Image: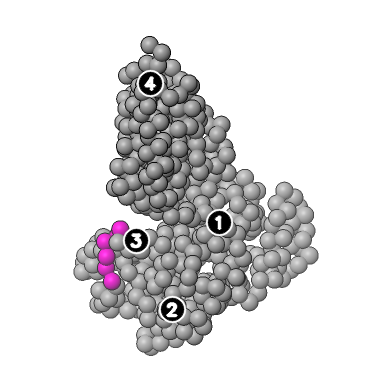
Amino acid sequence: MHKPANYPRTLKDWLKQLDSQLLPASSESLQPLRRALADSNRSRRELADLMQSCPALALSVLREANSKSSGLSEQTDSLEAAISRLGLSRTEALLNRLPAQPEQELPKPFRQILLISQHASQQANGLFASRLARLWQEVHWGSLLFLAPVWTLLAAYPELFVAWEQRVLVKGEPASKVEQDLLGVPLLKLCLALSESWRLPEWITQGYRLLVNDRRLLIKALHIAHNNEHPLQQQQCLDADSNLRRWLTQPANSILLANCLAISAHYAWNSPHSLRWQKLTGLFLQLPLDALQQQLHQHAVSSARQMLRTDLWHPAEALIWPWQARHLQAAAELPKPVVLSEWRQQCAQLLAQPSAFSNVLQLTACANHALEACGMQRVLILLADRNHTRLMTQQQTGLDKSAASLSLDPQQSQVLRRLLSAPAQLRLTPSNIAQFSAMLPGTLKSLFPSEHLLIRSIASNNRVVMLIFADQGGQTLSDVSVQGFGKTVQCIERALASFATRGR
């Protein structure tokens, strides 16, 4: 990814740029807040609770309440106290300053990082709030706002999130190298500087100081946590290091753990990075790993139920996928241009009379090549048995090697049953993916981690015999691409009809 010319490259320039950056907010979330602020019967606690749906406003209110212009040196970590300090008029003025846009028009990376923060807050509330009941406000608002410096960064430069996902999570490049390339400064150092400048809740600043200035304690704790199968040895190690033991029991660690769990789960629950933070959280809570994982998964599901979004990724979705599946894939190359000469050649072979094929394998191989030539990058052709009790791979292109031996029971999927009942085409898009995704087998979703997918069932002698799945590496499908796919499928249908009557 090329660095735009207007990227700041020093910590001072980044602070200047991001300190003046206004966070956008969805107009849908601002309307109920505007009505609530005008209602004199609303308590400060109710207003604070409502602001959870608009993290941008929560951050703005807390920053303003702790700013030098407030005239108060005492810092407040509670949104309820911040509203009381500012008063309703100033709070409403802050709301009116926020750039309001329809939810779907906000940059997707910005909305994705907000979802990660809300997931972290759900994990913190579920794991720690009851144990730290007197510190509930600190746990709740600290975990939600911990990534606020990153919100502001992505509001200004949303493309950075995609670059970070691809280079750090997918390709495994060192985060320090990627941050130096993209930002010119370490990301955590920038987050610490913003947290101190904005006077965010002390637990947030304390977490960033640990990550930037005192990683020695964290590394020692992670080393002990790794030995999670031997809790007695873990306790003996902690007893031998009183400083580490005192640090590990600090309540402020709860918001750091919750956010690291949410960030690592964004990629995979069972990645080494995620397991590392799970084990450390288990050591903090004195829970075995399996018991902790059960709680994490339950809280993730609860979080997903509260977030009715259709185009954002929530880690709870991965809980119904094969365990080794990953929703993040290497960025696809640009869709292949249609090679007209090759496409016409393959289609001519499909349309030949009499049939040019002596068996089904030859026919489907030609069909596969024709779909590639019309611009499809990933293709899966499944054949149905006579009773529609099994779907098995016949051809595949651009997919994981596991696709070659795929065998599915269509009775487990409402979508597959419907496609097998009659010839039909289904086009998955961001607007309908939530509706159909839950009805597709997890194996298929892991092979096509995409919001843009074409699925077609093809019949021969009035019985569906073949299902085709195709996309352009996750890229948006243009109308021309969809038309090309449709014409290719027509050729495949005619080839099947001709093949069925060969020799008569």
State how far apart marks 3 and 1 are (Cα): 30 Å
Q: Earlier in the sequence, mark 4 or mark 3?
A: 3
Q: Earlier in the sequence, mark 4 or mark 2?
A: 2
Instruction: Indicate whether 61 appears above or below 300.
Output: below
**Residue 473 left/right relative to 278:** left
Residue that label 4 marks: 354
State how far apart marks 4 and 2 are (Cα): 61 Å
Residue that label 3 marks: 53
Q: Residue at x 41, y 35 (%)?
A: 346
Identify the image quadrant of the C terminus.
top left
State how far apart marks 3 and 2 are (Cα): 35 Å
**Residue 460 left/right relative to 196:** left
Magenta residues, start to end: 99-104
Q: Say which mark, if any, is on residue 5.
A: 2
Amino acid type at mark 4: Pro
Task: Report whether residue 402 is seen.
Answer: yes
